[in-house]
Image (tube, rainbow, N blue to C red):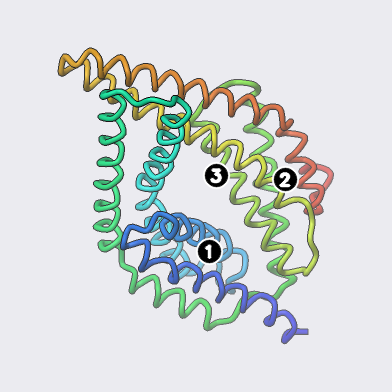
Amino acid sequence: MSTTIVDRATPLLKAQVRALFRQLPPALAGDAEAIHQMRVAGRRLRVALPLLARKPHGRRLRRGRRILRELTRSAGTSRDLDVGVALFEERLKERGEMDAERRTLRQRLRSARGRSRTRMAEALMDIDIARVRRDLRVVVSRRAELVFTALLRLRDARDMRGTAILESLDALGDGFDPAALHRLRIRLRRLRYAAELAEKLTGQTSEAPALFRQLQDALGHVRDAHVLACWMGRQTAAAVARGQAALAAAAREEEAVFLERSHEHHRSFLALSPAATVRRGLEAMGASRTAA
């Protein structure tokens, strides 16, 4: 039995470690897709380590998870600006014309993205990558946890995270609170990764990952539009301070456009009946009647 268990869990842990470091070189070079994939791989690994590793509270694992968090956070602003540039380019195409003010806004957004990529590369260079490599190598060399223990941990994580998500949804109601919605999205993402791990460990598929991802993606659209609206708001304030009335007016209009789009995405999220969808996903994972 032990051999069968290791064949499932240890290769899974090794694959997640490899997925992270495979994306690091192109991410450091500023490749937008590699930056995204590096963050995804780092987040997946942070969820997987305490669920699969033999010493979930060990010093190496705790240090590794902390460095992984630094790694994924360092690339956050750069990724936000990559998305912002794409959203604004799409908006300009929809508009059909581009005046001098919006040309300036586009150039400033692109420049901000370029500066952010440079800062990201510098921040990543400051992270002790060699240390996390060594720590993860030791964690993997100890082999993964027995599948029964891993599944018990998954059950506990599912119930705890599911309860927290449902409580957050209840507190939010229909309210539009970008910060709280972003925290909710993070919780949903972690629950989704746990659901995907459960599938790989058991060899059984369920609708849970797709349900959680649907909600996560909807909240991602809310955040992306809101982040760009906030950036436009800062451009408005800067233009007003410089006496650039036309630029301030253009930035203010774009801020309003993207703020309304964020609200539209929020309405789409609410249309998914998020609490009912989360309960359905938890049931698909085999959640207890109490947690669901």
Q: Quadrant of the C terminus?
A: top right
Mark with earlier residue (2, 1) = 1
Crowding at label 3, few (<14), some or many (≥20) Cα neighbours within 10 Å?
some
Classify mark 3: helix, strand or loop: helix
Vertical comparison of 4 with 118: above or below: below
The circle on residue 211 is 2
262 with respect to 248 (left or right): right
Separation of marks 2 and 3 at Cα, in angstroms: 15 Å
92 with respect to 245 (left or right): right
Which of discs 2 and 1 lies nearer the camera? The answer is 2
Crowding at label 1, few (<14), some or many (≥20) Cα neighbours within 10 Å?
many
Separation of marks 1 and 3 at Cα, in angstroms: 15 Å
Vertical comparison of 1 with 223: above or below: below
Mark with earlier residue (2, 3) = 3
Q: Which residue is mark 1?
A: 45
Looking at the picture, how far across and down is residue 189, in whole percent? 59, 48
Q: Marks 3 and 1: in contact by CB < 8 Å?
A: no
Q: Which residue is mark 3?
A: 186
State the image quarter where residue 250 is shown: top left
Type of residue at label 3?
A: Ile
Q: Residue at x 37, y 61 (%)?
A: 27
Looking at the picture, how far across and down is residue 196, in whole percent? 68, 59
**Residue at the farthest right position:** 289
Q: Marks 1 and 2: in contact by CB < 8 Å?
A: no
Type of residue at label 2?
A: Leu
25 with respect to 176 (left or right): left
Type of residue at label 1?
A: Leu
Classify mark 2: helix, strand or loop: helix
Q: Residue at x 72, y 79 (%)?
A: 5
Looking at the picture, how far across and down is residue 6, in whole percent? 68, 81
